[in-house]
Amino acid sequence: MSDASLKLLADCMLGRLAKWLRLLGYDTAYENDATDHELARRARAEGRILLTRDRELAQRRGLRTLLVCSEDLEEQVDEVREALGPAPDPSLTRCSVCNGLLEGVSGTDVADRVPPYVRQTHADFFRCTQCGRIYWRGSHVEAMDEELERFSPR
């Protein structure tokens, strides 16, 4: 199952995993304060697979779930990838905070939203289509690329 219709919903125990799945290109909604009932309702309504570490929740009838067994982030990513396939979108195409898609924008469009030095030293900028957060490939992305490399299929 590795197509654009693959949509995930992570429960409160999997916030760190949700962030990294977004960075890897998975459409991953995250609910850190929803009840089990609210999670189940949202997963059904939006056609999402619920990622959870809660065995009871994972066994609910009529709900597509993936029980994430490991507590280790790298192993969790492996569990998702093995069960659901590779991410449908390229890495670094989703907002790590809200899950929105990123769109390319010009430096002129974001000149008032980034530090002057960043504006002068970078040509490519991206804006989240949902929350408006601005991204660019700064020095921190090199470290993120190394982290993402850890999660690459072996």
Image (tube, rainbow, N blue to C red):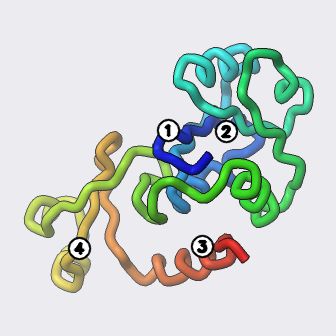
What is the number of the mark on residue 5? 1
List the residue tagged with mark 2.
10
Q: Residues within 10 Å of mark 3 (few under 14, many from 20)?
A: some
The answer to which image quadrant residue 148 occupies is bottom right
Q: Name the kind of residue labelled 2 in the image.
A: Ala
Q: Is residue 147 above or below residue 43?
A: below
**Label 2 CA crowd tier, 10 Å (few <14, some 14–19, many 20+):** many
Q: Check disc 4 and report the residue beneath it.
A: 124
Closer to us: mark 1 or mark 4? Answer: 1
Q: CA distance from mark 2 to mark 4?
A: 31 Å
Q: x, y percentage for residue 44?
A: 61, 19
Task: From the top left corner, tell me how far across and down residue 87 is, in percent.
Answer: 56, 56
Closer to the chain start, of discs 1 and 3, is 1
Residue 84 horizontal side relative to residue 13, left or right: left
Which quadrant: the C terminus? bottom right
Earlier sequence position, callout 2 versus callout 4 = 2
Dot 3 amino acid type? Leu
Which residue matches tag 3?
A: 148
The residue that appears at 73% across and 45% down in the rendered structure is 14
At a point 8% along the width and 66% down the height, the residue shown is 108
Q: Does 147 appear above or below 29?
A: below
Q: Nearer the viewer, mark 1 or mark 3?
A: 1
At numbered mark 2, what does the secondary structure look like: helix, strand or loop? strand
Q: Amino acid at mark 1?
A: Ser
Query: Which is more N-terminal, label 4 or label 1?
Result: 1
Kindly check if marks 2 and 4 are in contact, taking CB atoms under 8 A apart as contact.
no
- Looking at marks 1 and 2 on the same chain, the residue that comes earlier in the sequence is marked by 1
In percent of width and height, residue 131 lies at 34, 42
Rendering coords of residue 143 (x, y %): 55, 81
